[in-house]
Amino acid sequence: MSGAEKDAEAEAAAEVGTAAETAAERVLEVEGLGVTFGTDTGDVPAVCDIALHVQPGETLALVGESGSGKSTVALAALGLLPGNARVSGRITVGGTQVVGTGEAELARLRGRTASMVFQEPATALDPLTRVGAQIAEVIRNHRPLSRAEAAREAVELLRRVGIPEPERRASAFPFQLSGGQRQRVVIAMAIANSPDLLIADEPTTALDVTVQAEILDLLRGLAADYGTGVLLVTHNMGVVADFADRVAVMLRGEIVETGPVEQVLLRPSHEYTQRLLAAVPRLALSGEDAPEREGASVVELRDVSVRFGRGPSAVQALDGVTLDVRPGETVGLVGESGSGKSTAARVALGLIPPDAGTVSLFGTDLGRTRGRRRRALLSGVGVVFQDPVASLDARMSVAECVAEPLRMHRRGMSSADRRARVAEVLELVRLPKELAARGPRELSGGQRQRVSLARSLVLEPRLLVADEPTSALDVSVQRTVLEVIAELQRELGFACLFVSHDLAVVQEFAQRVVVMRAGRVEEQGPTMSTLLRPRSDYTRRLIAAVPVPDPVVQRRRRAQERTEATA
Amino acid sequence: MSAVLQSTTPTAEPVANYRLSLRRFTRNKLAVAGLVVVVVFLLFCFVGPLLYSTDQTHTDLHQVNLGPSGAHWLGTDAVGHDEVGRLMFGGQVSLLVGLAAGVLATVIGTLWGATAGYVGGWADAVMMRVVDAGIAIPALFILLVVSAITTPDTLGLILVLGLVSWLVPSRLVRAETLTLKSRDYVLTLRATGGTHGRAIARHILPNSVSTIVVAATFQVADAILLVAYVSYLGLGVQPPKTDWGGMLSAGLTAAYSGRWWLIVPPGLAIILVVCAFNAIGDGLRDAFDVRGRG
């Protein structure tokens, strides 16, 4: 089947879906669903009055930001909510009522009529069981097959989800597979008994963009070939555009908008959907390079190599990496997971000593500087890491967290001055004063990242190293945090080494970009010309794999990719 | 599941941390009972003698082997000591040695484990092999050998017990340190010119406090039991001093002639206090467990 035919068919299916709303045959039907969690600090309502349905062969995307309750709906559909959840309303899966049904009956349902693909393939598989055996177990749980028959079928399933050499791979342990392959195995388990309904909760969020595209392709093919209905839970509008027929948008536990994908993504009617879509970073298709910056490098890595481990199992994390950041500019360090971009940032920070090559920070060789001088040198650096939870010590108040660098490097500062400076920086990152006395636990992810930023700026650094500072945040929050960083950079003039896997974000905020792959610099140059006219094949593939929150564009790109692949 | 937790965690947590911890602790009924038992025994042993004074240093051969009566609630032992008073007197040693040795073991273990975990590399390897070797030799064996050679006093017992039982807490603290030192806030501190001392004192130790306190509670329970073993074998504190294990040992012969009051009270006291400390440890673990509250 050619790509164009498939697309036409998908479009037709979408139309049928909207026209035949009343069709009796629905693999999932949810009506008036409400879920409340009982916690230590009282009852927390998670979702209320949810109504949705999925038809055979159709994909419904349930989108929303963290805390919107989308995963709660997905788990409720299979009766998988934790014990402190109280569920009301009606959920029907393949004709079986789920709410109030006993575990035994639900167990027959799960994996047979409906199955689930979770976000994290690393934890969805048993690390001590061979993948073939894990798939066979799912088969034998529901069908009276012999061990040998189930094993044969498992190999067949591995072939169907696109694992090369399935006979050999069936006897592999999960750790011997890559993240993408593991997720394929999880999908193989999910489709092992040809379910009518597949629930996929952020199935590609833990994967790199190029792998993400492959997994989405796989899911799309399975849904089309076997008429499986899919409930796709995601926060990624690009994935929605790529994959869904219909979309339901959730906000604070309620569905605020629902409709066909073209309508919701291109002509959103609800104000929240509009805001959400506007916040999604998009790759620009044209633009000028920023003028090159003058001046001595703030930080410079020259021919840096780093090896982790020893002997045959050693990993070459960095291999002859050379890059620099000049005063006042932002350099975007991009690449997929394992490309070494975070390692490079940590080398620049002096956290990982290079095995070969030199690191110079503000013109001084960091490797040869020790003790007090090294600490003084490093006091000119600010750091923001990815994880908003791990970045702040939960035992300290916000004010203490922000004041820590002052305590380290401005010993003589009076406590009144310190308080004043902390208040000043909190205002810079647009956090209300009242938060100063709170603990990090009481803040949202975006607020925590801004506290991290405030801490990194309190000493007026000349260099800010930001390692995926917004990757753990929702898109709308991501935008505000990025804007705060960019604005402060204009105001305070620090240079920035910005590590990110998101090319659209880097394109918007960086003047130069360094593309890394497998520990080497694949190419580097001014942002616009590098991303619009990439010289390396790898960069081109990275750009092509970035999902665009526009179903029409996405379909065109996909068709183009296919013709390129077949050519 | 993380998404579910996220959606159930309100962004603002109005209840202060310690109060939530306290509530978790008090919800564990066994732990509360344990706390009551420990407090009662502490009062009994250290305040009790002020209200119920007896002579525990001189023997009184006119009053030996008496059964429970109005004058002596739990009778007297073979040299005429009042048994209730003896229980207080012996309990002072048992509790003091147990608490002090437990704390000492935890302090040594914490320093050792935190250093090994933080420094890492070959230092960690060497330090942890020392621990492995130590664990391979039964603590009781070392204890008995040392006691047999030196006949220790109270202070000696504390030192010996502390020095043989720090191994387990050192492993716990090392594991905790390993995870904490790779936390982003510790990396941030190091990347911006913070000293190692600051990282340990301000971040790693305060965040390990829960692990350390829980470990200490179990250490105290173990130490009380160990003192009892040693004294039961006659190698603990020497007469006229005694402890609960020593009382058991002294009363052993009496058990055959039906003088239960020399055996049952100290035995019960040991069991109750050890169970109580273990229950408190469990309760503290619940109270401090912050993982579910991300």
Image (cartoon, coloured by chain):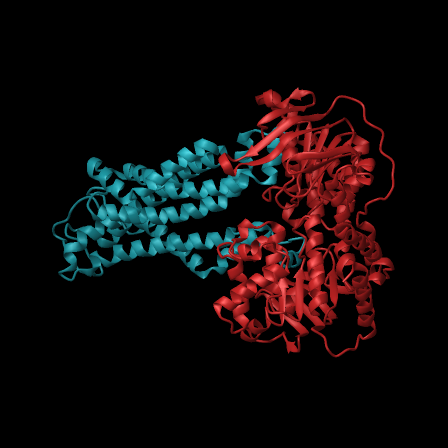
Chain colours: A red, B cyan
Horizontal arrangement in the rendering, residue A212 relative to residue B75 (left or right): right
Which residue is located at x 47 percent, y 52 percent? B284
In this rendered view, identify the residue nearer to me: B232 or B71: B232
Query: Relative to A354, does residue B14 appear above or below in the rendering?
Result: below
Query: Relative to A458, does residue B48 appear above or below in the rendering?
Result: below
Residue B255 in sight here: yes
In this rendered view, identify the residue nearer to me: A565 or A401: A565
Estimate the x, y position of residue B289 in percent, counting from the top left. 52, 52
Estimate the x, y position of residue B248 in percent, counting from the top left. 22, 53
Query: Relative to A335, does residue A185 appear above or below in the rendering?
Result: below
Residue A412 in sight here: no
In the image, farthest residue toward the front: A567
Estimate the x, y position of residue B178 in percent, counting from the top left. 50, 40
Which residue is located at x 64 percent, y 70 percent? A195
In this rendered view, identify the residue nearer to me: B277 or A28: A28
The quarter of the picture where the N terminus of chain A appears is bottom right
Estimate the x, y position of residue A283 in percent, counting from the top left. 81, 45
| Picture mark count | 0
Horizontal arrangement in the rendering, residue A409 relative to residue A332 (left or right): left
